Image: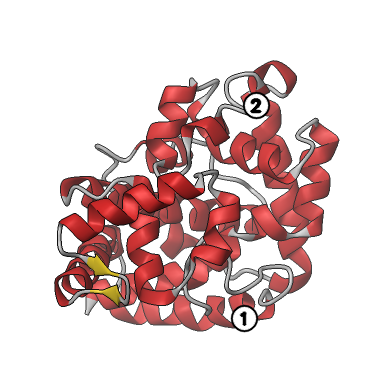
Amino acid sequence: MRAERARALWVVLETVHDVTYFAPEAKAAHAAAGLRGFWRGYVGTRAAPLGAASLGAVTAVFYNFAPSFLARSVPAIWEVVPPERALAARAAGAVAALRPQVGEVPAEALAVLRRVTAAAGWAGRPLGAANAALPWPDDPVAALWQAATTLREHRGDGHVAVLAAEGIDGLEAHALRDAADGSRAVVAPHRGWTDDEWAAARDRLAARGLVTADGLTPEGARLREHIERRTDELAAAPYAAATEDELAALDTLLRPIARRLVPAPVPHPNPVGAPSP
């Protein structure tokens, strides 16, 4: 039950976080800071909690992006916009996008979110840990976004760990998902892999008996289900710091907010891949 609740809350927290990438207010704040263009904004603001990270570090934690794609921004981006300025821009843009949709954030909800984030274990979770180390905002909307982002990256780090443990590299993860739901058209333009690289990844999956020309094999479907289930289980640990009633109340508060954000400013389907709230 805890893993199911964690997954349900991930869907709404992911949507709250995703204004960072899609909302006009966020894009404007990024551009004003010097992060011009969607992908400079994405890479600069998402990687900024790590400091002036190298291409190797960003490639490792972003996992399913082509290194050549990330190299267009990293590490040169830090000479244009230092991480501190990128962090300020992402917070300002996210808050500007969320405030009209959120209204008042109850102190009780923020207390639960802060307790949950404080209970998370950060060993082996670099993006989550970097976000957790940032100061807790005084502004309630900023605090809501910060908690959503930290828990989102906590889950994402765990997902990467599960993929790596199962021998599924970043592009193979995309190809495995595409075999299940035909998502390549949505994902491919936003991750930088070439057609030849996609074909090679699919061939590797086929050699393992995970996909055919018709889609997932039964073994591929079992592996994909296992990866999602194990990711949810790993993501659930921090939520033990709250009661089921507290988590249900959090869902009741956040789900309407998330639904107001879809399909504008947060489109669905989108390259992030989370279900619609």
Return the residue nearer the eye: 153 or 161: 161
* Amino acid type at image mark 2: Glu
- Residue underneath mark 2: 84
Percent position of residue 92, x then y: 74, 46
The correct choice, above or below, for 36 with respect to 191 in the image is above
Looking at the rendered structure, the secondary structure element under dot 2 is helix
Quarter the N terminus occupies: bottom left
In the figure, residue 141 lies in which quadrant? Answer: bottom right
Real-space CA distance between mark 1 and mark 2, rounded to the nearest whole angstrom: 31 Å
- Locate residue 71, reporting x and y percent: 56, 27
Which disc, if any, is residue 272?
none
Q: Which residue is mark 1?
A: 259
Q: Position of residue 69 (x, y in %)?
A: 56, 35
Q: Which mark sits nearer the N-terminus, 1 or 2?
A: 2
Residue placed most toward the observer, 161 or 215 = 215
Name the amino acid, label 1.
Arg
Q: Is residue 55 visible?
A: yes
Q: Is residue 174 left or right of residue 41?
A: left
* Label 1 residue SS: helix
